[in-house]
Image (tube, coloured by chain):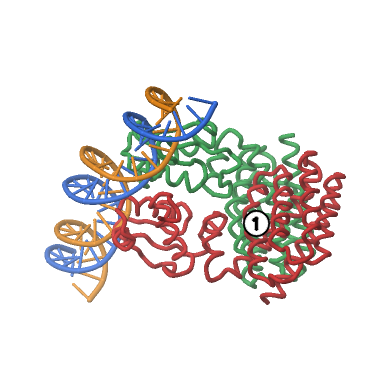
Chain colours: A green, B red, C orange, D blue
Amino acid sequence: MTVQARGLHAQVLDRLGPAITAGEHPPGSVLRTDELAQEYGVSRSVMREAVRVLESMQLVASRRRVGVTVRPVEEWNVYDPQVIRWRLAGADRARQLRSLTVLRSAVEPAAAGLAARHASPEQCAELTRCALGMVATSRGQRLAEYLVHDVAFHRVILSASGNEMFARLGDVVAEVLSGRTRHEVMFEDPDPAAVTLHVRVAEAVREGDAAEAERLTREITVGALRELDVLAP
Amino acid sequence: MTVQARGLHAQVLDRLGPAITAGEHPPGSVLRTDELAQEYGVSRSVMREAVRVLESMQLVASRRRVGVTVRPVEEWNVYDPQVIRWRLAGADRARQLRSLTVLRSAVEPAAAGLAARHASPEQCAELTRCALGMVATSRGQRLAEYLVHDVAFHRVILSASGNEMFARLGDVVAEVLSGRTRHEVMFEDPDPAAVTLHVRVAEAVREGDAAEAERLTREITVGALRELDVLAP
DNA sequence: CGACGCTAAAAAGTCTGACTTTTGAGGTGT
DNA sequence: ACACCTCAAAAGTCAGACTTTTTAGCGTCG
């Protein structure tokens, strides 16, 4: 039984996409649809659909009489969740985590500030629940549970900001956080100071103190950046 | 002669994509590939490729025996440049410009700070050139020329940050800036204070003063936000 | 009367093969 | 050296047949 029953084209993408982002087909190299179809054992129609998707991600460009050319990295749609996933699974996972964390550091404090102004009572309650969950699981090797609350916390902040662009970064942050837990020292409890910061952010948002929410969240993200520096200089 | 000689599927996308983002097919509505193909006068293969792309943008979901369902807005890939373009061309252009400007306000100061540390001498020179160009065209109804330099300036900042996620927002910022010029009072020269701020950012980056570059850029973006508040409360 | 399971049809998915269009490369002539 | 022309390679397009999944409707049995 196949693990994923999605369409054939999706299965092809799951192999071809990572191959490209991993540099197996370096930028500039040219692929032929027919050859790819043969290689992956699918019909040309299926392969064409896969190539179309890669094209919409700016990973490749298809030109008549030439073939499918892999584009330079700078032109890729690095915000496409699928591209992010492929790259996080590949070789330069570390580099990718870093650039995503830097993005996070820029966005999350601003989002927290907005959340302090726009968050609904339900969102405030959810935020507090998440923070309490983090506290409850912050000791005793319960990292998996802790991660769930951590991710939920940041999702609520981004969502409560009321800005759809911020809200859509929830998945990215989730990837970064879970990637961090998976990649790092799995056997160490989270920094108590970070946990406290989350609780205080929840308080600040609840009290509508935008400046404080922003400042505290910035502290969280600079902590994340520092962690990264320790692991990968 | 057709204006665009790109593939048929791209032409279909240019009509179907905007139709969806404009709410012509509201979330939850179901489309049939065969009907769409007939409606647009293309073969099913072409329509299928178009639908695949829309699917990869999370605009629609395709399910057997059901059809192609339009997904809720919150799930759309709002960072996809094509989606951004479609939405900027559509009805809620104003809302879109606002959320993009908020994103800009979060990202650009951070990018400027990083640029102050990482910018190459060439990038510093280019930045200064852009700032001077802005000064030179800041008076006398030369808004089109001014815009070119303005866009170039912000592109260099984002690119010089050394962070690929920031760099890829160059197109978004370009859209926001040009959209602003197009949408606003076309007959008024830019704010002299803003021009001065750009010059000072260039200086700060050149001197490697990250904190100052960040602070000045934040002043620029809060100005942009204020402008937006004046136009659309 | 309700729950369970069967059947049939609807729609997407897949494959194949034939045909068209664009365009780069190489050859030819001036 | 340059312009032009021809040819073939590869993507693009189309039509049709077939497969697979999923759901709605129906009937049977408890």
Q: Position of residue B216 (x, y in %)?
A: 83, 57
In this view, A205 is above or below A194: below
Q: Residue at x 29, y 61 (%)?
A: B38
Residue shown at 58% from the left, 39% from the top: A73
Residue B129: horizontal and vertical position, in percent?
Answer: 79, 48
From this view, report whether residue B50 is shown above or below residue A25: below
- The spot of residue A200 in percent (x, y) is 76, 61
Residue A81 spot, x, y in % from top left:
54, 49
Q: In the rendered image, which residue does mark 1 sit on?
A: B174
Q: Chain of mark 1?
A: B
B67 or C3, which lies in front? B67
- Which element type, helix, strand or loop, lies under badge 1? helix
Amino acid carrying label 1: it is Ala
Left or right of D17 on screen, residue A2: right
Measuring 45% from the left and 65% from the top, which residue is drawn there? B20
Residue at horizontal 79 percent and vertical 64 percent from the top: B139
Image quarter where the N terminus of chain B lies is bottom left
Lateral position of residue A143 relative to residue A39, left or right? right
**As displayed, is residue B162 above or below residue B12?**
above
Q: Is residue A92 visible?
A: yes
Is the C terminus of chain B in the top left, top right, bottom left or bottom right quadrant? bottom right
Towards the viewer: A165 or B223: B223
